Image (cartoon, rainbow, N blue to C red):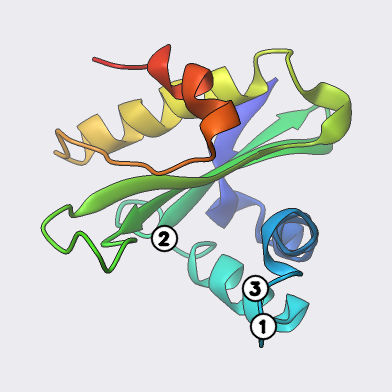
Amino acid sequence: MKISLLADHSYEAPKIAKWYYDEWARVAPNVTEEKVLEKVIEKSVNRNSIPLSLVAHLDSELIGVIELKIRENKNYPEYEYWVGGVFTNQDYRRKGVAHALLESAKNKAINMGIRTLYLQCESFNIDLYLNHEH
């Protein structure tokens, strides 16, 4: 498995947008797959500034993605940097993909001088993130 910047694989943006739309956005009013794609594309150009995305590939197959975001939650404007958009292809879940993406995202943030990352998640995913506390 190789973790790299989405900026190096921007052709994957439509696939990621479909994943996100199908997993989270399709039930949201006024959200289209095209709007989701626009947001993914925003994160596909940055290499050393947030927002950005990291992707996981196995051979040439895209198997996961994670995002580093800025001020993701309007309810917490004092929390600047966030992890989000963690998604692993169904066929590769529980195989360490999300773990590798989280470690890579943390390392990328540290290399950019970011010391604290925040996240919000569904209750069934809490254990995944607790394994990455520091």
The residue pinned by badge 2 equals 46
Q: Is residue 112 left or right of residue 8?
A: left
Residue 67 in the image: state x and y as whole percent: 48, 48
The disc placed on residue 60 is none
Element carrying mark 3: helix
Which residue sits at x=16%, y=64%? 77
Which sits in the foreground, 93 or 63? Answer: 93
- The amino acid type, in three-letter code, at marker 3 is Val
Question: Going from the N terminus, do you reach mark 3 or mark 1 first?
Answer: 1
- The amino acid type, in three-letter code, at marker 2 is Asn
Q: Is residue 120 left or right of residue 118?
A: right
Q: Is residue 67 left or right of residue 12?
A: left
Element carrying mark 2: loop
Q: Residues within 10 Å of mark 1 (few under 14, many from 20)?
A: few
Q: Residues within 10 Å of mark 3 (few under 14, many from 20)?
A: many
Foreground mark, 2 or 3, reads 3
Question: Going from the N terminus, do you reach mark 2 or mark 3 first?
Answer: 3
The residue pinned by badge 1 equals 29
Residue 95 in the image: state x and y as whole percent: 73, 13
Which residue sits at x=74%, y=64%? 21
Which residue sits at x=23%, y=33%? 111
The residue pinned by badge 3 equals 36
Residue 14 in the image: state x and y as whole percent: 77, 66
Foreground mark, 2 or 1, reads 1
